[in-house]
Amino acid sequence: MKIGNVKLEGNLILAPMAGITNLPFRLLCKKYGADLVYSEMINLNALSRNNKATEKLCLTCKEEKPVAFQLFGLREDAIKKSVEKIEDNADIIDFNFGCPAHQIVGAGSGSALLKRPEKVGKIIATLVKHSSKPVTAKIRLGYDKDISVKLAKIIEDNGASAIAIHARTYKQGFSGKADWDAIAKVKEEINIPVIGNGDILNGMHTKKLLEKCDAVMIGRGAIGDPMLFSRIKTFLDKNEVVRMPSLDEKINLFLEYYKTAKKYDLVNVHTLKQRSQEFTKGLRGSTVIRKELNKISSEEKLVKYMKSLL
Ligand SMILES: Cc1cc2nc3c(=O)[nH]c(=O)nc-3n(C[C@H](O)[C@H](O)[C@H](O)COP(=O)(O)O)c2cc1C
């Protein structure tokens, strides 16, 4: 599959997730089979103003390629500078038209843009004009009703190279089931690749959704479980269901995450603790582990405790 001039080896994609898909996490997903990884959403205005914390979200390395960097915001006049700043690192530039967070929607960006299809078109056109890299859009089905076909046509007409659809409206939040048939309807109407997203947790889900679109994008299923991508690949290739990772495998993944985070100066105790809880969730003894992790407040003690579980 190709997105613009970017060739993907397969069609499994890591979704953009704020607070989760930083460089160390993306590298793990890549290692275990993600064919394309998306960054956390990056504030367009902050990036254009050279905000240091925002610039840190734009780190990459050659092992994770290809990578898509996702921008969010509203101001078309900030797009040119932001694109200039990420273009060297990004293989693809994505725009967020789906974030449901109150402060984002309240400021008129993310899901609020789903109410303004014309503005969606202008943002895509401006991105395409200023970027030498393929531009993609990530949408929900609509704000309070499904207008995804209309949005997708506008996005295609303004020059985007692919579209990712989280098959829920803004109003649905994360409730109910993602409507994969709505993704199929969009696929029938446009010619650029359609990436389906929402509720993919295993190989069977992936197989079903791939009957309706070109690629699948996986979010929550990969949190604490980057090996999900390799299990899905095995299922698609050999129709085999692979066992879940063991505690040792999960701890080693966490330690690998930590090592890369250290290398790129991305360690922060709060997120490291969050990661340690995600990587040990659902395993035998995880309630006890969670209680112990809750008592720990330093990086050294956290890593020492995680190593002691091996
Ligand atoms: C913690 C979290 C953070 C997210 N951050 C973003 C984001 O930065 N940009 C975005 O487009 N979507 C974001 N999403 C939405 C996901 O990309 C995805 O569309 C959604 O979770 C549905 O897919 P899933 O069922 O595979 O999780 C986020 C979701 C979660 C759970």
Image: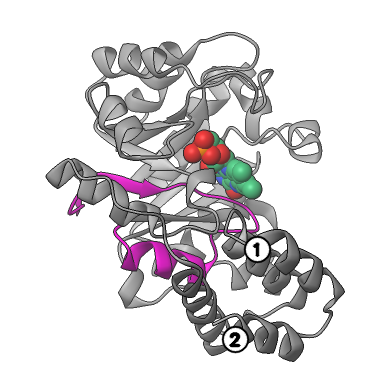
| Residue 16 painted magenta | yes
- The relative height of residue 46 versus residue 308 in the rendered view (above or below) is above
Residue at point 34% right, 16% down?
A: 186
Q: Position of residue 18 (x, y in %)?
A: 63, 53
Q: Is residue 34 left or right of residue 278?
A: left
Residue at point 35% right, 31% down?
A: 205
Residue at point 13% right, 45% down?
A: 238
Question: Which is closer to the viewer, label 1 or label 2?
Answer: 1
* Residue range highlighted in magenta: 6-34
Residue 214 in which image quadrant: top left
Residue 161 in which image quadrant: top left
Q: Is residue 179 left or right of residue 18?
A: left
The residue wearing badge 1 is 285
Mark 2 neighbour density, 10 Å: few (under 14) some (14–19) many (20 or more): some
- The relative height of residue 246 versus residue 16 in the rendered view (above or below) is below
Residue type at the position of mark 2: Lys
Q: Position of residue 292 (x, y in %)?
A: 79, 73
Q: Assign the N terminus to one quadrant of the image.
A: top left
Between residue 20 and residue 8, name the one nearer to us: 20
The disc placed on residue 81 is none
The residue wearing badge 2 is 307
Q: Is residue 3 left or right of residue 178?
A: left
Q: Assign the C terminus to one quadrant of the image.
A: bottom right
Mark 1 neighbour density, 10 Å: few (under 14) some (14–19) many (20 or more): few
Q: Position of residue 291 (x, y in %)?
A: 80, 66
